[in-house]
Image (cartoon, rainbow, N blue to C red):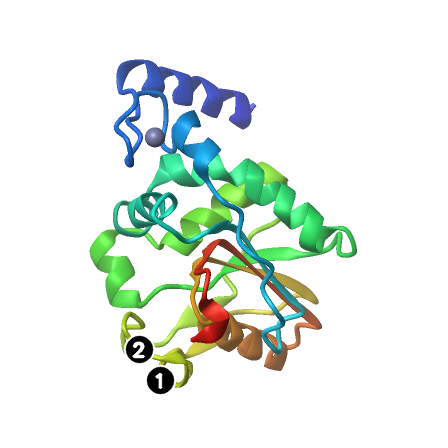
Amino acid sequence: MLQRWRGYVDDFLEQWFPTLCVRCGALGGSPCSVCTDQFVGAAPIPEIPPLKRVAALLRYDEISRPFIADLKYHGGWSVARRLAPALSFLLDDAIDAQHRDLVLTWAPTIPERARRRGFDQAEVLARELAHRSGQPVRRLLRRLPGEHQTGRNRSERAQGVHFTAVGPVPDVVVVLDDVVTTGSTLAAAATVLCEAGARSVFGLALAATPDWSQM
Ligand SMILES: [Zn+2]
């Protein structure tokens, strides 16, 4: 019922306030079908302990960048909604096959930033994926105030991200993030979740930087 109602609301909004593609300006959603056709899939991501596996949907490049930026700085509901089905396939393919009892969560952004913007882009992504995949989603992490990640190298980043676990942590957790750059944010999240009792933690991102392993 809720799903049908939501479908009506989406149709209504699209009819009266059509979404423009943030990259090319075309009508009919963001990303539009022309831009979607140009996306390049992310390369396989090598192991990032203690994560069991990390998978990303898109290569972070000049095609995907405007959409990631829209998600990051403006909440990008259209981006999250339109890419959630593909992310759901990736979840099935990379993780869900062996783990039916998984819980989705997200690597929270810096609290002041989430407050200022009024949303957390990784949470937007996790909730949209939960809606699409039917998997449960729960807030399992809280980010402690710390340094911004942009422009820092891998070891600086590893020291700069601090999370604490929230509530009882399930056995199998999938942590969502917008972009995997060095993997340090996901690794920090997985470490805390494992210490709090998770048996298997997976990472899932909308995009991965192509040269992330060299950083
Ligand atoms: Zn477009």
Label 1 secondary element: helix
Q: Which residue is mark 2?
A: 152
Residue 135 visible to the viewer: no
Point out the image quarter for the N terminus.
top right
Looking at the image, which residue is at 31% across and 30% down?
21
Mark 1: few/some/many CA within 10 Å (<14, 14-19, 20+): few
The amino acid pointed to by label 1 is Glu
| Count of picture labels | 2
Quarter for ligand 1? top left
Q: Nearer the viewer, residue 11 or 28?
A: 28
User: Is 57 left or right of 93, judged from the image as shown?
Assistant: left
In three-dimensional space, the C-alpha distance between marks 2 and 1, rounded to whole angstroms, equals 6 Å
Residue 114 picture quarter: bottom left
Residue 156: mark in rendering: 1
Q: Nearer the viewer, residue 197 or 29?
A: 29
Is residue 210 positioned above or below 85 on the image?
Answer: below
Residue 113 percent across, percent down from the top left: 25, 62
Mark 2: few/some/many CA within 10 Å (<14, 14-19, 20+): few
The amino acid pointed to by label 2 is Arg
Residue 52 percent across, percent down from the top left: 67, 69
Is residue 208 positioned above or below 75 on the image?
Answer: below
Looking at the image, which residue is at 53% across and 58% down?
105
Residue 169 percent across, percent down from the top left: 61, 69
